[in-house]
Amino acid sequence: MRNVLAVVYRDALIRLTSLTWLFFDMAVPLLYLLMFGVGFNKAVGMGVTMGGAAVSYNDFFLAGVLSMSCFGSAINQSYGFFVDRDNGIFYEFLTYPMTRGEFLLGKMLFQCIMALAQTALTLTAAVLLLDIPVNLTLLPLTVLAVMAGIAGWFFALSIVAFRVRRNDTFNTLINVAYFVLMFISSMFYPLDAVPLWLKYLSYANPLTWHTDVLRYLTVGAGSLPVIALESAGFLLFLVISFLFAQQALKKAA
C-alpha cells in the first residue's frame, strides 16, 4: 500500500504545481452542465421521454456530464504517461521496488480522489442552481460509480498509451474514439427513439452502461434489471482493462 500511496503523492504534487490544470479539472464538468444542459433544456422544452416517463433535459443530462468527466479525466491521466516517458521518469519508475499493478493503482487512485471533488461540485450545482432532484440517499453509490468509471477508462486508455509511442498518434486515436463513443451512447439522448442499429451499437458501448448506471443513481431513471446487467458489464470491462493494462505495461518496459 505504501508504494501505491507514493504514486498518489507524486501525482498530487505535480497537479498542485499547475493550478490552471487543477481549476479545469474541477470546473469543466460544471461548465458542461451549465452551458449544454441549460441550453438544451430550453430547446427541448417538454423534456425527454425514457421508458414512458418524461424528465427534464437537465435531469437527463446530469449523468452524461458525470460520465463525460470520467472519460476526460482518464484521458488526462493516461496522457501523463507520455510526459513521463519524454522526461525519462517513466522508465525510472519501472525500476522501483513496486509491481506494475501498484503503479497503475496509484495513478488510478489519485484520479479517483480528484473525482470526489469534481462530483461534489457538479452535484451541488445541479441541486442548488438547476433544481435537479438528485437522490441523495444513493450518493455513496453514485460516488463509487464515478470512481469505477474513471478506473475502467483509465486502464483501457492506458493500454493504448503503452502501445503507442507517439503522443500525436495517441491524441488522434483517443479523440476519434471519444467522439464516436459519445455519440453512440445514451449520454446526450435517450435510446428509446433511435434507429435499431444505433440502439444495438449503443448498448454494446461501455460508455452507455456507465451513463445509464449514473442516471439511475442520480435521478432514478431507468429499469433496475437493465441497470444491474450494465453494472456487471462495466465491472467486467474494468477488470479486463486492468489485466490487459498490466500486460501492456510489462511490454512497454
Image (cartoon, rainbow, N blue to C red):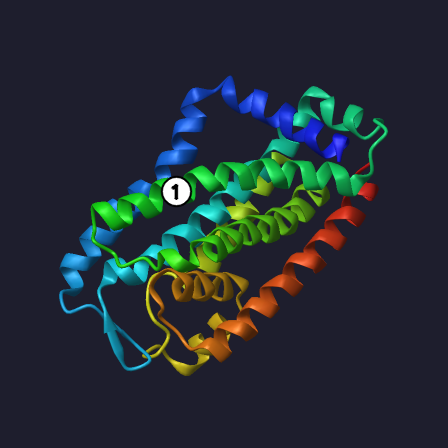
Pick the front one: 59 or 131: 131
Instruction: Give how far across and how far down residue 110 sits, in percent.
Output: 59, 35
Image quadrant assignment for residue 191: bottom left
Residue type, mark 1 in image: Ala
Pick the front one: 222 or 194: 222
Is residue 206 something that shows in the picture?
yes
Q: Tell me: 162 left or right of 234.
A: right
Residue that sits furthest to the front in the current view: 137
Q: Tell me: 175 left or right of 245.
A: left
Question: Which residue carries the number 1 mark?
Answer: 120
Instruction: Give how far across and how far down residue 25 sits, in percent.
Output: 43, 34
Residue at screen point 39% across, 61% down:
187
Is residue 204 something that shows in the picture?
no
Residue at screen point 68% across, 36% down:
106
Query: Which part of the image, by quadrant, shows the N terminus?
Result: top right
Residue at screen point 26% across, 78% down:
53
Please say if 24 is above or below 170.
Answer: above
Pick the front one: 247 or 220: 220
| Label 1: element kind | helix
